[in-house]
Image (cartoon, rainbow, N blue to C red):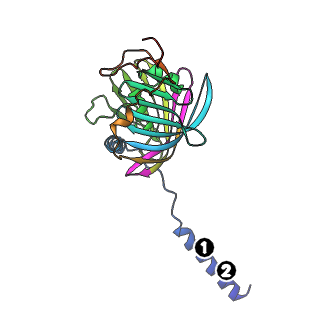
């Protein structure tokens, strides 16, 4: 072999050796950090005060399935307004939650319903029976039960590559799991007493107003398998929300059928009167 060829091959070998030395070793994932998870949960509790957004809503259950575009306004802990839009962008249904009060106006069917926002009433509307306060929090990207800094029952446990969080609020409990690569909650379950009632999950987290907000939310009925999914197309956090948005009075005129959802109404709420022409 000619000397200049041997010199060239030697130079190439040195270059390859140097380049291999410059390739960084694969980063080993660090151990889960329970304190970071706790801090993140408490920060999210304080940071999310309202949500305004447009989302694609889908549901499936024993009575069928469907999907629609919705305009959503949330004001945790217990107020919500949802407008379902037609493919043309017109409003076909409006539903509001105000504490324990549920009001629904179906524009297409000329029906108006009001009553207590019970878990069962929301189950008939959404295919998944969820208590109203838990539903508002889930749609706002929060765990169904509040996380309190001084709660002695709050448990945060390393579980493999994730962290499990457990807490209790009255007769309800929740278990939450982070994903393997972060401090945000990825999935969870909630129940009452000894029964699991709901399973849920969060995905597609994006930086929004200083919060890693989950643009995708799903909730599942643990008993009967009904499921709802929400995928936000766009949203804004912590904008002012008018209280009047959550009050949905009966439409005027005699063209709308009035439906009593039953149950005791919360203090201050009144049942709607009969339609024009109906006996009182």
Outermost residue toward the front in this view: 277
3D distance between C-alphas at marks 1 and 2: 11 Å
Q: Secondary structure at mark 2?
A: helix
- What residue would you read off at disc 1? 16
Where is 82 relative to 43, above or below? above
- What residue would you read off at disc 2? 9
Outermost residue toward the right in this view: 1
Q: Mark 1 or mark 2: name the one nearer the start of the chain.
A: 2
Determine the image quadrant of residue 5. bottom right
Where is 67 relative to 277, above or below? below
Q: Is residue 208 magenta?
A: yes
Considering depth in this image, is 280 or 194 the residue closer to the camera?
A: 280
Residue 75 in the image: state x and y as whole percent. Answer: 36, 37
Residue 94 in the image: state x and y as whole percent. Answer: 48, 32
Residue 95 in the image: state x and y as whole percent. Answer: 46, 30
Determine the image quadrant of residue 137. top left
Q: Which residues are magenta?
A: 207-229
What predominant SS class does the magenta segment belong to? Answer: strand
Considering depth in this image, is 39 or 91 the residue closer to the camera?
A: 91
């Amino acid at each position: 072999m000619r000397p200049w060829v041997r010199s060239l091959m030697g130079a190439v070998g040195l270059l390859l050796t140097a380049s291999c030395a410059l390739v960084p070793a694969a980063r080993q994932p660090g151990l889960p950090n329970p304190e970071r998870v706790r801090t993140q949960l408490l920060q999210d509790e304080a940071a999310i005060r309202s949500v305004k957004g447009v989302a694609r809503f889908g549901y499936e259950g024993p009575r069928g399935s469907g999907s629609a575009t919705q305009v959503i306004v949330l004001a945790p802990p217990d107020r919500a307004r949802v407008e379902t839009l037609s493919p043309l962008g017109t409003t076909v249904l409006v539903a509001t939650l105000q504490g324990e009060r549920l009001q629904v106006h179906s524009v297409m069917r000329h029906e108006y319903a009001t009553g207590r926002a019970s878990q069962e009433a929301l189950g008939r509307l959404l295919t998944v029976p969820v208590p109203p306060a838990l539903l508002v929090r889930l749609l706002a990207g929060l765990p169904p039960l509040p996380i309190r800094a001084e709660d002695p029952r709050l448990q945060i446990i390393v579980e493999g590559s994730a962290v499990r969080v457990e807490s209790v609020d009255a007769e309800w409990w929740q278990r939450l799991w982070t994903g393997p690569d972060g401090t945000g909650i990825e999935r969870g379950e909630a129940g009452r007493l000894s029964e699991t009632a709901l399973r849920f999950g969060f995905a597609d987290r994006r930086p929004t107003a200083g919060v890693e907000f989950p643009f995708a939310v799903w909730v599942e009925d643990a008993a009967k398998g009904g499921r709802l999914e929400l995928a936000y197309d766009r949203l804004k956090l912590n904008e002012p929300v008018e209280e009047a948005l959550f009050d949905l009075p009966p439409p005027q005129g005699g063209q709308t059928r009035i439906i009593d959802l039953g149950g005791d109404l919360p203090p201050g709420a009144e049942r709607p009167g009969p339609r024009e022409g109906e006996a009182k």
